Image: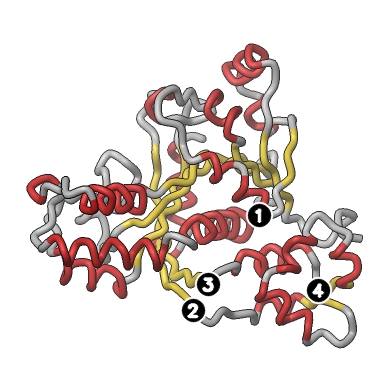
Amino acid sequence: MDINTAKEVIACLPEGKTVFNYYKDRYAAFILSQVIGEECAIADLKQSAFSGLLNKSVIKDIVSKSGNGKLQHEQLEMAWGKTTEPFLLTLDTWGHKDRDWDQVSRNGYNLVLQLNFSNKHDAMFRKQLKPETHHSFKYWDHPVMKQGERALFRETLAWARIDFDFKTNEALIEELQTDWLRIARCLLRQIDLGRTQFRETGFNTTTDKLKTYLQNVLLSYGKIWDEAMLMATIQFIHLELGIDNIFLHTPESGAAVKKIKDRLPPRSLYSSLPKKFCFSQTDKAPEFLCKNRAFRKLEKKLGGTRWNIINLGGNDARIH
């Protein structure tokens, strides 16, 4: 997209930040709430592409209380988990007019949705590790929140890059990524092997305190960050941008289209994760990409592409 479109979207949102609470499997309640309309027969859902969501504990609890055999939108809106992690969502832009560096599917810019820690984490992080401004958990040339950009600063756990087109009612999730947890896993391995060099980490603490932090952050966020990031992204695309058709790259086509040649992203983010969210697969690329001459040329050279796709347009023939 062009930079003006991205900036206009950011300007339309209040202060550019949103509180976002996530509990394990919350995405199941959200997706169902968007596709069933006001209510839907549970028997119909069992025969739909969204049947797998009924096996999630939060949905099982709701279904067990539905005496009329129907799942209602209101029930899903009121669902809540026992253990919830708070986050702060912020928006930014990404693009340097260098497609190879930017890893985008077409020339232009991406909108960035940042999943930031809450002060619950950041206060503990600062107290326990005493980080310097530049520390090991983030790369400043990646789309993370940077100190001084906003009145309220939070460390960025993960982000999603998004391209979209209002005219075609399509959005493409270009990337889901966390530097924080990837580096945390690496540092923990280095500590266990006795190789950690504190002059290289940007922390003024002890090995024991760093190891305790790493173990805690991986335990608290390691199992939910990808779910939280993808749910926050599709919720933003659907409810804030008003777009129904949401695409996400597949591992092979995504690497080829974005020209990723060296370190490939985790395969699960573009295979098992979208499958869990009930994305289906298609060989039909987003219409707005097909209008791009460079993409058409590349797709022809590749012999076709594969995409994950979900439609959140509401109660339709996919269920009934």
Query: Which residue is tagged 3?
Result: 23
Q: Position of residue 126 (x, y in %)?
A: 18, 67
Choose the circle earlier in sequence order: 2 or 1.
2
Precedes in sequence: disc 3 or disc 4: 3
Residue under label 1: 276
Estimate the spatial distance between the alpha carbons at disc 2 and disc 1, rounded to whole Å: 20 Å
What is the x, y in percent for residue 113?
Answer: 45, 52
Residue under the point 78% across and 83% down:
64
Crowding near the residue tagged with mark 2, few <14, some 14–19, many ≥20 C-alpha atoms within 10 Å: few
Left or right: residue 135 versus residue 262 is: left
Helix, strand or loop at disc 4? loop
Q: Say what amino acid the circle numbered 4 marks.
A: Glu
Asked if disc 2 and disc 3 are in contact, CB closer than 8 Å, the reply is yes
- The circle drawn on residue 136 is none
Dot placed on the residue nearer the N-terminal end, 1 or 4:
4
Q: What residue is pinned by disc 4? A: 38
